[in-house]
Image (spheres, rainbow, N blue to C red):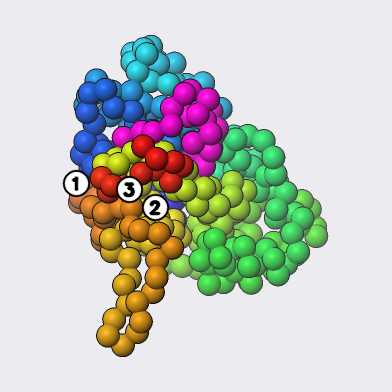
Amino acid sequence: MADIMSSPASPHQSVLLSEVVSALSPRDGAIYVDGTFGAGGYSRAILEAANCTVFAIDRDPGAVRDAQPLLDRFKGRLHILQGRFGDMAKLLATQGIDQVQGVTLDLGVSSMQLDQAERGFSFRFHGPLDMRMEQEGETAADLVNKMAEQPLADLIFTFGEEKKARRVAKAIIAARALAPITTTQQLGEIVRRAIGPTPANRIDPATRTFQALRIAVNDEMGEIDRGLEAADAILAPGGRLAIVSFHSLEDRRVKAFLRSRSTSAPRGSRHLPETPQAEAPRYRLISPGGIEPSDAEIARNPRARSARLRIAERLADAHPAGGAA
């Protein structure tokens, strides 16, 4: 979510909600996976649309803890699993499930995490420089205080797409030589000074650096890769994937994965020989160019402005990657 860190605090609103539910087209008796439960918006809407079952996954123990009201409301139909969506096939196997009719993923950080100062995701609040979704392991403070200058610059450039990454890394190294960088406020000020003034209508200069650190702390790109493979392993013929991304790094990964396994994969031309595919296509792309939020949704929820939904349907004769139907 490249630009939401500077958005004003607002109650959580699931982005492209009606479009995601329409894409999955829930039906009675079917099983769906909400791989990024958060506040439960997608799970709730899916369960309201049909007499179906949802297995919801979240790596944040806080999200799992707060799910009780929905568990009570949809007793027996909603099941919450704590863990990473990249492990969804393994998590579902513990529940005796090896096939599902739909999977949805809402990538990136949730608005609840952003709006909790103590989680350290946003420079809008003064808090510890943390950013851990699972609330364990290495923090963002660990990275900025321990990494060498060049690797830190590479991280900020790659995951934040920050053109002035070298300047930012150099400023961080200089600042931490005087005192450890431990708060969101400290880091935000260091980055802003390093980048310099920006037009008032542009995103906060610290946005891209904070994004890069968050992605690194939570291995978000690796998790997307694992999540797509896991979904591929459990999606039944005719089932659908509905994936919402919030910045180009996420969207490119999703687009490449789906296209490489779809009927839209490159087939060669009269100038170039056909490139043999490792296996037959398994998906039909429902939204080749992706679906973006309407102007009305963006007006209601500014955090939706960079979102893009991609939808793919497992071909009827293509069984899950994990085994035959």
Counting residues from the start of the chain, the first of labels 3 and 1 encountered is: 1
- How far is mark 3 from mark 1, CA to CA? 38 Å
Mark nearer the viewer, 2 or 1: 2
Q: Residue 306 occupies which quadrant of the picture?
A: bottom left
Residue situated in front as seen by the camera: 266 or 103:
266
SS for tag 3?
loop
* 112, above or below 204, in the image: above
Q: Residue 60 occupies which quadrant of the picture?
A: top right
- How far is mark 2 from mark 3, CA to CA? 29 Å
Counting residues from the start of the chain, the first of labels 2 and 1 encountered is: 2
**Three-letter amino acid code of the residue under disc 2:** Phe
Residue situated in front as seen by the camera: 191 or 144:
144
Residue named by callout 2: 246
Q: Which portion, as a residue range, is magenta?
A: 81-110
Left or right of 135, for residue 250? left
Label 2 neighbourhood size at 10 Å, few (<14), some (14-19), many (20+)?
A: many
Residue 141's mark? none
Residue named by callout 1: 296
Mark nearer the viewer, 3 or 1: 3
Left or right of 251, for residue 58? right
Q: Is residue 199 magenta?
A: no
Label 3 neighbourhood size at 10 Å, few (<14), some (14-19), many (20+)?
A: some
Residue named by callout 3: 318
Quarter of the image for the C terminus: give it.
Answer: top left
**Three-letter amino acid code of the residue under disc 1:** Ala
Left or right of 111, for residue 270? left
